[in-house]
Amino acid sequence: MSKIGFIGVGNMGGPMARNLIKAGHDVTVFDLSEALLAVLEKDGATIAGSATVAVKDTDVVVTMLPAGKHVQSVYFDDVFANAQMGALMIDCSTIDVATSRKVHAEANAKGFKMVDAPVSGGVGGAEAGTLTFMVGGIADAFDQAKPLLDIMGKTIVHCGGAGNGQAAKICNNMMLGIQMASVSEAFLLAEKLGLDADKLFNVSSTASGQCWSLTTYCPVPGPVPTSPANNDYKPGFAAPLMKKDMGLAIEAADQLGVKVDAAKCAAAIYDAYVEAGGETKDFSGIINHIRDASK
């Protein structure tokens, strides 16, 4: 059994912490939301009044935070000065690669092992313990983290050195964002052409247009009963998160001189969708924004 400090227990972090508790680990949690902490306390977590308290005397620190500035602040201001010497750090946030590598370097300098381990799979995957973890860090740190990641996920991939988990995540989500935009446009074109959505799904799900955004997360109600389209686009992966991830990918591409025109076109649609009221909806709800813009 490990003594774990878990910082950030929102839509994703909460279920992940809960699965660690169910597996028998001693988990202390901190979040700015008292309501979220109250729920986890009922599930067996110990509640900390601050990030500093959450990580004190722990073997492992897990973080799931909104952005790079939050990750850097928490680690530099709270974690490194208060965690037990030799503790393992697992950052599951999705952030820019440069900040991730900066935090890794500081962790190593202070004698901590660290992995960046962003996730894919949405809230459903977090609850079911079937997330995909894309992990960056030295082999020893990965080996130490993997038994805990196995509790929270189904597919654990070591992507290489520090920051490579973040690199894999933003590349994957850039593909996902483009795919969902294109799938949405195709279904809307089919609608205008008089082609039934189920018929298009039956063709494309077994043909060259097949992709996850179609077969698992179809943006129209009907073909995939478990997709958010059948639940008023209640977020499994919220639109603002896709907007953020597309921005991270484009920022990295611009810094490195890589042309990502398709990504920039898709990102502009997500930006407009969020600004038009999609901030509380799933990213697949982009189909409704495109439909409205097509009238």
Image: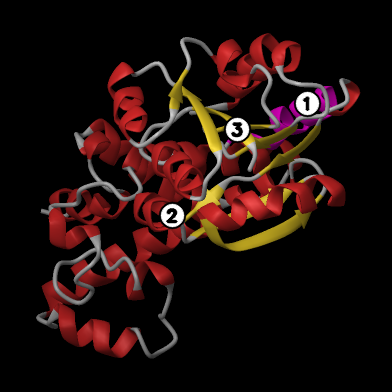
Q: Which quadrant does the N terminus fall into?
A: top right
> Given the image, on which type of amino acid does mark 1 rest?
Lys
Name the residue at 45% across, 37% down: 13
What is the tally of numbered marks visible in this picture? 3
Q: Nearer the viewer, mark 2 or mark 3?
A: 3
- The residue indicated by pointer 3 is 4
The overriding secondary structure of the stretch rendered in magenta is helix
Q: Residues within 10 Å of mark 3 (few under 14, many from 20)?
A: many
Q: Residues within 10 Å of mark 1 (few under 14, many from 20)?
A: few
Q: Which mark is residue 102?
A: 1
Left or right: residue 260 compared with residue 240: right
Q: Is residue 101 above or below residue 120?
A: above
Q: Is residue 255 above or below residue 194?
A: above
- In the rendered structure, which disc, 1 or 2, sits on the residue that comes first in sequence? 1
- In the rendered structure, which disc, 3 or 1, sits on the residue that comes first in sequence? 3
Left or right: residue 133 compared with residue 227: right
Q: Look at the image and give the residue range highlighted in magenta.
A: 95-107
Is 97 within the magenta? yes
Q: CA distance from mark 1 to mark 2?
A: 27 Å
Left or right: residue 58 compared with residue 154: right
- In the rendered structure, which disc, 2 or 3, sits on the residue that comes first in sequence? 3
- The residue indicated by pointer 2 is 177
Expressed as whole percent of the image width and height from the top left, the position of residue 10 reads: 38, 32
Q: Residues within 10 Å of mark 2 (few under 14, many from 20)?
A: many
Q: CA distance from mark 2 to mark 3?
A: 33 Å
